[in-house]
Image (tube, rainbow, N blue to C red):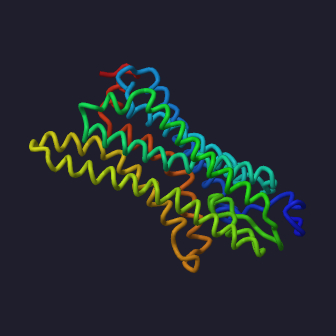
Amino acid sequence: MTTSNHSSVTEFILEGLTNLPQLQLPLFLLFLGIYVVTVVGNLGMIILIAISSQLHSPMYYFLSHLSFIDLCYSSIITPKTLVHFVSEKNFISFLECMAQLYFFLSFAIAEGYLLTAMAYDHYVAICSPLLYNTFMSQKTCSIMMGMVYSLGLFGAIVHTTHMSMLSFCGSHIVSHYPSFFFIPLLTLSCSSTHINEILLFVIGGFNALAPTLAVLISYAFILSSILRIRSTEGRSKAFGTCSSHLMAVGIFFGSMTFMYFKPPSSNTMEQEKVSSVFYTTVIPMLNPLIYSLRNKNVKSTLRKAVGGR
């Protein structure tokens, strides 16, 4: 890699998940299987929600966008990873790296805010059911989704713009597996790295803490309302409504917290690889499984779609 400054950098060397040749093919098949399940699951969820009138409600409107986001940000990372398992030359150009960084950040940040919007939807459904159709109108849902994507695009623009202006010094190997949130910390050794670290924690901290606090506040009100329900059946139904979303929130924000909010001294390359594999490939596969296997309406619609009873 050329080493004078950012304008002369043309490509990065990518470090794979393993250097053992005998593991390349098994890992390729494993990741290919995960990606196929991810595409089929998320695309299937989008199509199912689109064609079924039973699923035309705000909850499933948000769920279809969650599947779209998962499909997109998995497709930004996984195909490139599959190529590197079978390719002898594992390089990524500077422009390609910046583009991948931008789109991945856009969808990852948007997912955090979308999960927050879904928490608000559950809050209104449980705490103010009589006003649900008023508060969660089609116009309101569209505005909320516009804000979700706008926040994702804005956060990605700020971080990617600053990244593209930094100087790259020395000879560096870029790990493809730590997600591109973390690439600045792994690949830069110049004085400007400190500024980028601060920017990373400011933007990353806000995009993690703001949705997390909003979700916690929403579920505090939801829990308070559920505890006031007298019937056991009513409580069970209310908890069932939230269970899938709580699992998705826990997996997403839990993995993000483990990945980015720990002391730098505790980081190891192996930990980063495992964390990033889970974050970039496994989560997009899990979300449609969580919502399809734990949602009666989705399972019922799916059975009808395939001709079952």
Residue 258 visible somewhere in the drawing: yes
Tag count: 0
Question: Quick one: 39 or 72, which is closer to the camera?
Answer: 72
Q: Residue furthest left?
A: 230
Q: Establish if 291 lies above or below 197.
A: above
- Classify residue 18 by image quadrant: bottom right
State the residue at coordinates (14%, 47%): 228
- Can see residue 41? no
Q: Residue at x 45, y 28 (%)?
A: 139
Q: Give the x, y percent position of residue 46.
A: 49, 30
Q: Residue at x 49, y 66 (%)?
A: 258
Name the quadrant of the C terminus.
Answer: top left
Splitting the image into 4 quarters, where does residue 35 fall?
top right
Q: Is residue 238 left or right of residue 133?
A: left
* Residue 206 higher or lower than 35, as above or below: below
State which quarter of the image contains the N terminus: bottom right
Residue 275 pos. (x, y %): 54, 63
**Which residue is found at the position 73% from the left and 48% from the top?**
99
Picture coordinates of residue 134, whole percent (x, y): 33, 29
